[in-house]
Image: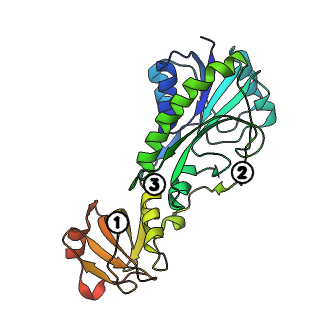
Amino acid sequence: MEPIIFAGTPENAAQSLRDLVKAGYEVRLVITREDAPIGRKRVVAPSPVALAAVDLGLKVLKTNRITPEDESFIGSVGARLAVVVAFGALLKQSTIETLELGWFNLHYSVLPRWRGASPVQSSLAAGDASTGVTLFKIDQGLDTGFVVGVAETMIEPGENAARLLARLTALGSSLLSQELPRLLAGVAALTPQLGVASYAPKIDRTMSKISLADSAATAINKVLAYNPEPMAWLEFNGQPLRVLDARQVTELLASGELKATIGGVLLGLGDGSSIELLEVQPAGKPVMKATDWFRGTKETERSIS
């Protein structure tokens, strides 16, 4: 099978790499970002893609910005096409031109909706009913290139970003298996993106804060969209309280009111709607059931802002 290049960085990209190798593709070179500090202790470690490449015995190029020297090396490995999955950097035109057939990005939305860095989170935060994956040819724009293929899926009730990303990763591997042979044979049809574009910005922690001004639907969308990172949170007594799991309920409470239930803790929001907190993490403490957290609080100190 004709050799290809793979570029990516996070765990979902590592899974895509493993799936390509399992499907029989010869990955001549893996490009990933340089080792970076991770976790609270900020220990410098290789990317998940770098680790997967080593396990698979593949050649690795680590770079945060592809240089002319990198381009020369990429052009010398004997591949005509590259697959990109969440590499984390835009490619210059000179880089794009290093490969005869081009660079093809697997993006986790149905383009042109949710171009940018956080398509999965943005889709969930917006309450979209469906999403999908798009394979497109990279050009100099931000996720603007011609489309090779699309696979769509409904978003399941209560599905958070981690679960949706896992499903989209598997769906993306199937799409690659379907389209790569045609791309390598030079017979794939490329079509322009159609529809109104929307943008998925880089995630900022302020985006995941649950405000009393939110509706219940908006608050639950945040809980789903930002799990596992950066996690939805609300401010309780001046400290962040992370919300890992919650659900919308019909009981009406005053804005900011908290009320214990058998299975959780109700929180009243600004429009009179309510959510039930099910699993939380107070600052400096482990994840716990919301009922256990609530029992440890004092009634006179229970303020949400």
Q: Position of residue 153 (x, y in %)?
A: 50, 44
Marks 2 and 1: which is nearer the front?
Answer: 2
Residue 134 lies, with reference to residue 179, above or below; the image says below
Q: How many marks can you see?
A: 3
In the picture, which quadrant includes the N terminus?
top right
Residue name at image x 26 percent, y 68 percent: 290
Q: Position of residue 207 (x, y in %)?
A: 54, 65
- State if disc 2 and disc 3 touch (CB < 8 Å): no
The quarter holding residue 198 reads bottom right
Marks 3 and 2: which is nearer the front?
Answer: 2
Q: Amino acid at mark 3?
A: Glu
Q: Which residue is mark 3?
A: 229
Report how far apart the C-alphas of labels 1 and 3 lie in the structure: 19 Å
Residue 3 lies, with reference to residue 113, above or below; the image says above
Chain-order first, disc 1 or disc 3? 3
Q: Which residue is mark 2?
A: 195
Report how far apart the C-alphas of labels 2 and 1 lie in the structure: 33 Å
